[in-house]
Amino acid sequence: MSLKYIIEEDNTKRYQKPKNQNLIVNKEKYIFGCEFEFYLTNNNNFDLLLKELFDISEVDLLVNELSIPRTDDSNDCMHLKYDDTLEENGWEISIPKCSYNQLKIYIETINRLIEKYASTNNDTGFHIHISTVNKDGINLDFYKFALLSNEQNLLNSWYVRNQHCKNVMDVMNYNDKKDSKNIKTKKGRIWNLEKVDNHRIEIRTMGGESYHLQNTKIFDELDKYKEIFIETLLKDSEKYISLKKNHLDKINTASDEIKIEFSKLFLNDN
């Protein structure tokens, strides 16, 4: 029996649950989300994947074969959409915003669905979103988050998908914050870390062939990223002040020739 749906104004198909509510516990300080990119191994798998995806969550499932669903409650729903950054049969699943414990359950469950109905390769990525529930008075220090992540070797531990995103430290190791931002803007390049807004970060470091089979590694890095996110919002520790000073010294002592040659290489990179 096929699932019933309604059509939204943006042509998204909405598969409704009896109660469409996001079950985030009110006491949560931080909320999470993630996106899985993959290739269906067979077109006939689509309906099977859709049915199982519908069953694993208490929220509505939004399906769009052309673009990102843009309904008012989009962030509180599960998404299944065609991914135009991938080749034919490339799709993406996005989960509703959730707690950290819910995030891990979603990852385990959806990775099993990918193993069952799909595959991943070096074009596919796995993205994590971390944000604060409270948006007021928050201005996340992207530079601090990047340095702390780099210190724990999180930014280069997966397959480097250069055609999709750059390691932020490839630029920040040779340029100050202002110049790094200018280089990124001029290139229009996606980085493996992005400050989406003042209270939210997107992490694009994970992915590559068979990433969906590496839950242990994903969870280990998630724990670290969560700790780093929390630390980034706190007053700078003595350890971080020293880390920042050492990094600025590295930038300041780099020769102009190295900076110029690196910038040319980066800006000309396709």
Image (cartoon, rainbow, N blue to C red):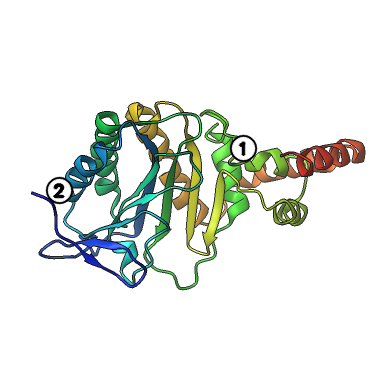
* Circle 1: residue type: Gln
Q: Would residue 161 be visible to someone looking at this image?
A: yes
Give the residue displayed 52% in from the left and 64% down from the top: 198
Q: Is residue 159 left or right of residue 177?
A: left
- Tag 1 secondary structure: loop
- Tag 2 secondary structure: helix
Q: Is residue 71 left or right of residue 102?
A: right
Q: Position of residue 125 (x, y in %)?
A: 46, 38
Up/down of 136 relative to 225, above or below: below
Q: For the residue carrying disc 2, how many other residues have a C-alpha within 10 Å: few (<14), some (14-19), or many (20+)? A: few
Q: Is residue 248 left or right of residue 222?
A: right
Which residue lies under the disc numbered 2? 55
Q: Position of residue 74 (x, y in %)?
A: 33, 64
Q: Position of residue 116 (x, y in %)?
A: 24, 30
Give the residue displayed 34% in from the left and 60% down from the top: 29
Up/down of 38 relative to 203, above or below: above
Q: Are marks 1 and 2 in contact (CB under 8 Å)?
A: no
Residue projecting furthest to the front: 44
Rounded to the nearest angstrom, the CA distance separating label 1 from label 2 is: 35 Å
Q: What is the total number of numbered labels drawn onto the structure image?
A: 2
Q: For the residue carrying disc 1, how many other residues have a C-alpha within 10 Å: few (<14), some (14-19), or many (20+)? A: few
- N-terminal of the two: label 1 or label 2? 2
Which residue is nearer to you in this view: 232 or 201? 201
Give the residue displayed 71% in from the left and 39% down from the top: 270
Q: Is residue 138 left or right of residue 117?
A: right
Residue 252 lies in quadrant: top right
* Circle 2: residue type: Asp
Give the residue displayed 25% in from the left and 35% down from the top: 113
Q: Position of residue 152 (x, y in %)?
A: 53, 33
Query: What number is the disc on residue 258?
Result: none
Which residue lies under the disc numbered 1? 163
Which residue is nearer to you in this view: 111 or 257? 111
